Image (cartoon, helix red, strand yellow):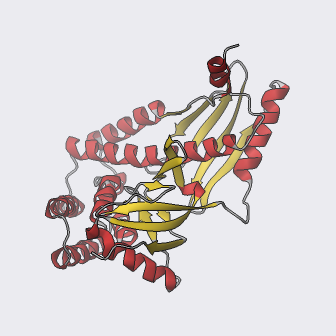
Amino acid sequence: MSFMKYLESKARPQILTVMDDYKEKLSADMSGLLMKPNEQMDEARKNIINIREVTRTLSELAYPLIEEFRMAVRTGDPKKVSHAHMTFRRWAKYSESNRTLADKIETAMFQYQNKLYSKEFGAEDADEVIKSSLGESQAILDRMSHAIDLAISKIPTWHNHRVIIEAISPEKGWIINEARVTVGDAFLASFVYENTSTGLKVKSVSEEEMPASLQVDMQALLNKLRSNPKYNRILTLYMTRPLSERRYFEIAKRELALGIKAVLPSHVTLATIPLTGESDVWKVRVEEKYLLEFLQEGDVKQYHIVGEEAPIRWIERMSNEK
């Protein structure tokens, strides 16, 4: 066997995420609302706004109250939504924010509030609910995929089984909370993976006849996913951010000193070495479970944030007198 063939045989297979059945049921549910409106209409209106896209734009603006904004919008309560909108508007007025991005938030919020007060629900509204629900559900599947891939990377005896994560349509609402994870090729093993308020959890395991190698690997994978170690690996990394975001990260540093949670938004890229230039360079410490390695050049690794944000454990700005 050639060296390249050997490397290919040792590589972990891609973890696939599947939403076909979920998409079909979601579309059917929205069609049902259009044909025969019922008490689910108000719940559907809450999901008209694409909160994932709005959150991404707020991250690009370095808005310091993203979590509070997202929680208020998610309630669908017109008063809370209006308060979050006005708070953002005041911040945008007195900060040096990107006007184009701020206007994008303004437009999204005006449209959302109009829909909350409206009694109408048309085909375009249904399409927006589908788009928003699919985006949030895909983010949940991505977190599951990352957790499983990280667990597999710590199992040296893993036999390169295929892994498929399939969304399970929720009984209430339209954003998934569970997925069925299937492991194997000719023989299959599976379990239900659940997204809860306290993190991802293995909910149930399907016990079927399987080869010893698959049984051993499944047990190792489940043990890794179920484990709740007291110590999570923390990486010290660097990020280069524009000067316009300095105030956001200075506030984050102050909040950490006061014992208040501070987060890195999803659009930042982290690296194992500082990159010099005209922008600020920040040194940060983040738990590995919130990061996804996407590039390695020599000894330099770069990471994306998994999900919408990552809690900061420590942050410090390196020398830049501008």
Image quadrant occupied by the C terminus: bottom left
Q: Name the residue nearer the viewer: 79 or 183.
A: 183
| Quadrant of res 181 | top right
- Measuring from the top left, give residue 67's x and y in whole percent: 40, 69
Q: Name the residue nearer the viewer: 200 or 118.
A: 200
Q: Residue furthest right?
A: 212
Q: Is residue 41 above or below residue 34?
A: below
Q: Residue furthest top?
A: 1
Q: Residue at x 33, y 50 (%)?
A: 38
Q: Is residue 163 above or below residue 116?
A: above
Is residue 40 among the parts visible in the rendering?
Answer: yes
- Measuring from the top left, give residue 133's x and y in whole percent: 38, 47
Q: Residue at x 46, y 36 (%)?
A: 22
Q: Is residue 114 above or below residue 146?
A: below
Image quadrant occupied by the N terminus: top right
Q: Residue at x 82, y 34 (%)?
A: 216
Is residue 63 among the parts visible in the rendering?
Answer: no
- Measuring from the top left, give residue 266's x and y in whole percent: 40, 57
Q: Residue at x 40, y 39 (%)?
A: 26
Q: Is residue 37 left or right of residue 206?
A: left
Q: Name the residue nearer the viewer: 177 or 211.
A: 211
- Measuring from the top left, give residue 261's x and y in whole percent: 49, 75
Q: Is residue 220 left or right of residue 100?
A: right
| Quadrant of res 281 | bottom left
Q: Is residue 245 left or right of residue 312?
A: left
Q: Is residue 229 left or right of residue 263?
A: right
Number of numbered discs on residues? 0
Q: Name the residue nearer the viewer: 154 or 24.
A: 154
